[in-house]
């Protein structure tokens, strides 16, 4: 009897301890995780989501919001509890999943080309203390009508390709009857791929159509959209298509941009080396064609700074840019203008008091004075060497009765007549 009481006294405390442990575990569970897809007005940190329904091949948007944030990050996870996005950082390598918006209070992602395997519950979490979560159920609808082709799927291209290389895309569409036709596009321009390959689906009266496209890429293909479109009589509103961006790696093309088109003596000035490549260039080298860089010139990555310009900085400068894929270079001729050169018209000098201008003015004045003196001397010389003879004959010779008398009168032999006189001027 005493042993039974002892066993009872030991059993009740054990049960009491087990109950306390269970209650504590339940309390901890509720304290560390709050899961809901409804709005709780008394908890501003509780995530809010909503359920979505989408058809196979469509696009579903998952939105998660909180009213307030204490610098914690929002996270979306898929049905297998794999992290899709943690803030703006991609966690799962699936090109169908893209980030739309990421802020402290909102995280929006999209899943394109939805498949039946995407059906299920998705979780949005915020890592506060305690962690709070909310679930969104994605319902994927199967194709309604047999024989309608599914949205095409593009495979075979994952990473960027270097300029001049080749890339092959494979487009597949299933479930069509009769077999669908596939078309390739680069942006809005249709391009030719290989002939379609048609295969019948086992246990279904439908077909799977496959097409390949091989391109030799150039830098102009970077960021181009490669699209595969399905053409089928059952598609009333145009075609179904899938697009994939093309990333091409290429060496940079380089240009030099001066701070101003009219660098002046005494001013600060810089040259900027601009490289256009994929990826963007990160290493820059500056050189001077006719010698070393000026002592007052300082290299700052893509910039070449001049603290105070002078005529000795004139020359041809070269910039070389490297982005790891290749290198590009370009030259620029620097011509430093005098401090008085007008910015609007380089031929107009705004300060006429310079030494050079004074010398030129003095020389012009001396030349004008010498020319005036020469004109005066030449005029006096011509006047002194031009004579005019005036002859005044004695009056009365015209009235003489004969020639002898006229001669006598002309020589002054007749009384009362003036002698002939000559005046030299």
Image (cartoon, helix red, strand yellow):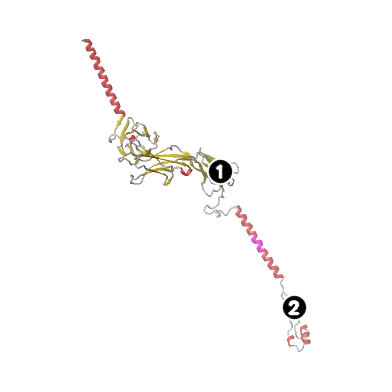
First of labels 1, 2 by sequence position: 1
Residue 369 part of the magenta-drawn span: yes
Quadrant housing the C terminus: bottom right
**Quarter of the view holding residue 122:** top left
Taking the image as shown, residue 192 lies to the left or right of residue 33, namely right
Question: On the image, numbered disc 1 is attached to which residue?
Answer: 318
Rendered location of residue 187, percent (x, y): 42, 45
- The residue segment tinted magenta is 367-373
Residue 285 part of the magenta-drawn span: no
Q: Residue at x 63, y 58 (%)?
A: 364
Question: On the image, numbered disc 2 is attached to which residue?
Answer: 422
**SS at badge 2:** strand
40, 409: nearer the viewer = 40
Rendered location of residue 170, percent (x, y): 42, 39
318, 244: nearer the viewer = 244
Q: Residues within 10 Å of mark 2 (few under 14, many from 20)?
A: few
20, 401: nearer the viewer = 20
Comparing labels 1 and 2, the label whose residue is closer to the camera: 1
Q: Main secondary structure of the magenta part?
A: helix
In the depicted structure, whether residue 418 falls above or below residue 14? below
Q: Residue at x 30, y 28 (%)?
A: 31
Quadrant housing the N terminus: top left
Q: Are marks 1 and 2 in contact (CB under 8 Å)?
A: no
- The span from disc 1 to disc 2 (Cα, nearest Å) is 91 Å
In the depicted structure, whether residue 358 falls above or below residue 46? below
Residue found at the very far top of the displayed protein: 2
Rendered location of residue 223, percent (x, y): 44, 42
Rendered location of residue 241, percent (x, y): 38, 43
Residue found at the very far left of the displayed protein: 1
In the depicted structure, whether residue 358 falls above or below residue 10? below
């Amino acid at each position: 009897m005493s042993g039974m009481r002892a066993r009872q006294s030991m059993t009740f405390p054990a049960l009491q301890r087990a109950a306390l442990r269970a209650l504590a575990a339940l309390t901890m569970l509720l304290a560390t995780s709050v899961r809901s897809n409804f709005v709780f007005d008394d908890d501003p940190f509780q995530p809010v989501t909503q359920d979505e329904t989408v058809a196979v091949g469509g696009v579903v948007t998952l939105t998660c919001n909180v009213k307030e944030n204490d610098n914690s990050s929002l996270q979306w996870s898929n049905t297998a509890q794999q992290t899709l996005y943690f803030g703006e950082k991609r966690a799962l390598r699936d090109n169908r999943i893209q980030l739309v918006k990421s802020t402290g209070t909102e995280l929006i992602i999209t899943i394109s080309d939805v498949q039946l395997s995407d059906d299920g519950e998705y979780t949005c979490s915020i890592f506060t203390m305690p962690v709070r979560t909310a679930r969104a159920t994605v319902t994927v609808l199967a194709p309604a009508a047999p024989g309608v082709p599914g949205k095409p799927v593009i495979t075979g291209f994952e990473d960027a390709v270097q300029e001049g290389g080749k890339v092959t895309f494979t487009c597949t569409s299933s479930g069509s009857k009769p077999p669908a036709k596939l078309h390739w596009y680069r942006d809005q321009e249709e391009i030719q791929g290989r002939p379609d390959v048609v295969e019948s689906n086992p246990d279904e009266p439908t077909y799977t159509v496959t097409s390949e496209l091989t391109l030799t890429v150039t830098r102009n293909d970077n960021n181009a959209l490669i699209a595969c479109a399905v053409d089928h009589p059952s598609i009333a509103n145009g075609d179904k298509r899938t697009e994939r961006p093309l990333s091409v790696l290429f060496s940079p093309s380089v240009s030099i941009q001066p701070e101003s088109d009219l660098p002046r003596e005494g001013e600060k000035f810089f040259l900027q080396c601009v490289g256009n490549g994929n990826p963007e260039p990160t290493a820059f080298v500056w050189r001077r064609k006719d010698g070393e860089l000026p002592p007052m010139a300082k290299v700052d990555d893509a910039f070449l700074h001049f603290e105070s310009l002078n005529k000795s900085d004139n020359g041809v400068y070269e910039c070389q840019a490297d982005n790891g894929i290749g290198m590009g270079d370009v030259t620029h001729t620097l011509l430093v203008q005098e401090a008085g050169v007008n910015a609007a018209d380089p031929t107009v000098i705004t300060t006429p008091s310079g030494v050079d201008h004074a010398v030129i003015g003095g020389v012009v004045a001396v030349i004008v004075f010498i020319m005036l003196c020469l004109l005066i001397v030449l005029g006096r010389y011509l006047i002194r060497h031009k004579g005019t003879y005036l002859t005044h004959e004695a009056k009365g010779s015209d009235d003489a009765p004969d020639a002898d008398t006229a001669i006598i009168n002309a020589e002054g032999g007749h009384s009362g007549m003036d002698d002939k006189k000559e005046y030299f001027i």
